[in-house]
């Protein structure tokens, strides 16, 4: 198993954490229609994807096509007509759930909101892909 830069990862838990954080960043970039590559000052583990313009294009490199199609269908009413969602996240915490998975809890503080969420992911370590991901809104 190798890390995103081709070197051995420090451990599989770190790889799941890095991929989960990249997924959140790329999802926010897609929803917010943030153009361009990942800025150099942002921590982003999949270095080979950093220069790709747009979150959706980066997501398509490490999400299974069927999962990305489901997300596109679910988000199409929200994004129809060129609307964007400016997502603001705070207090990200990672917890491994298995060697191939983990959960990241975060708070959406968009527009003064204070909504807590959990994203759970499963990772295919050999292909460095997210094999599945889902979100659950947590009680306040």
Image (cartoon, rainbow, N blue to C red):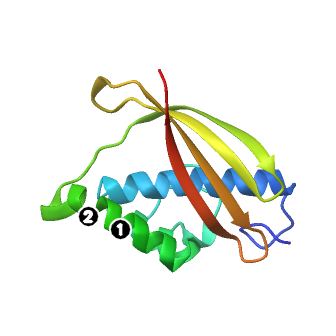
Q: Is residue 9 above or below residue 124?
A: above
Q: What percent of the width, then of the height, locates residue 8?
A: 87, 66
Identify the residue at the far top of this view.
Answer: 140
Image location (x, y in percent) of residue 3:
78, 66
Task: Answer few, some or many: residues within 10 Å of disc 2's Cα (few below 14, many 20 plus, some between 14 and 19).
Answer: few
Q: Is residue 107 visible?
A: yes
Q: Position of residue 43 (x, y in %)?
A: 59, 49
Q: CA distance from mark 2 to mark 1?
A: 6 Å
Write down the residue under mark 1: 72
16 sits to left or right of 104: right
Say above or below: 136 vs 122.
Answer: above
Tell me if 139 is positioned left or right of 9 in this view: left
Q: Secondary structure at mark 2?
A: helix
User: Tag 1, which secondary structure?
Assistant: helix
Residue 2: image quadrant is bottom right
Pick the residue in front: 42 or 74. Answer: 74
Residue, disc 2: 76
Q: Is residue 81 above or below residue 95?
A: below
Q: Residue at x 53, y 66 (%)?
A: 50
Q: Label 1 neighbourhood size at 10 Å, few (<14), some (14-19), many (20+)?
A: some
Q: Residue at x 36, y 60 (%)?
A: 30
Q: Quadrant of the N terminus?
A: bottom right
Q: Is residue 39 left or right of residue 35?
A: right
Residue 97, numbered label: none
Q: Residue at x 78, y 73 (%)?
A: 6
Q: How many marks?
A: 2
* Residue nearest the viewer, comparing 117 with 111: 117
**Residue with the most extreme left position:** 81
The reply to whether callout 2 and callout 1 are in contact (CB within 8 Å) is yes
Q: Residue 66: horizontal and vertical position, in percent? A: 49, 77
């Amino acid at each position: 198993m190798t890390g995103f830069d081709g070197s051995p990862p420090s451990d599989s838990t770190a790889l799941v954490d890095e991929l989960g954080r990249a997924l959140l960043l790329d999802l926010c970039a897609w929803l917010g229609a943030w153009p361009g590559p990942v800025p150099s000052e942002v921590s982003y583990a999949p270095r080979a994807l950093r220069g790709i313009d747009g979150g959706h294009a980066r997501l398509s490199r490490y999400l299974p096509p069927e999962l990305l199609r489901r997300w596109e269908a679910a988000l199409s009413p929200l994004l129809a007509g060129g609307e964007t969602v400016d997502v603001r996240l705070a207090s990200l915490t990672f917890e491994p759930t298995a060697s191939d998975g983990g959960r990241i809890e975060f708070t959406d503080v968009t527009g003064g909101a204070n909504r807590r969420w959990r994203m759970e992911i499963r990772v295919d370590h050999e292909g460095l892909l997210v094999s599945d991901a889902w979100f659950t809104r947590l009680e306040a």
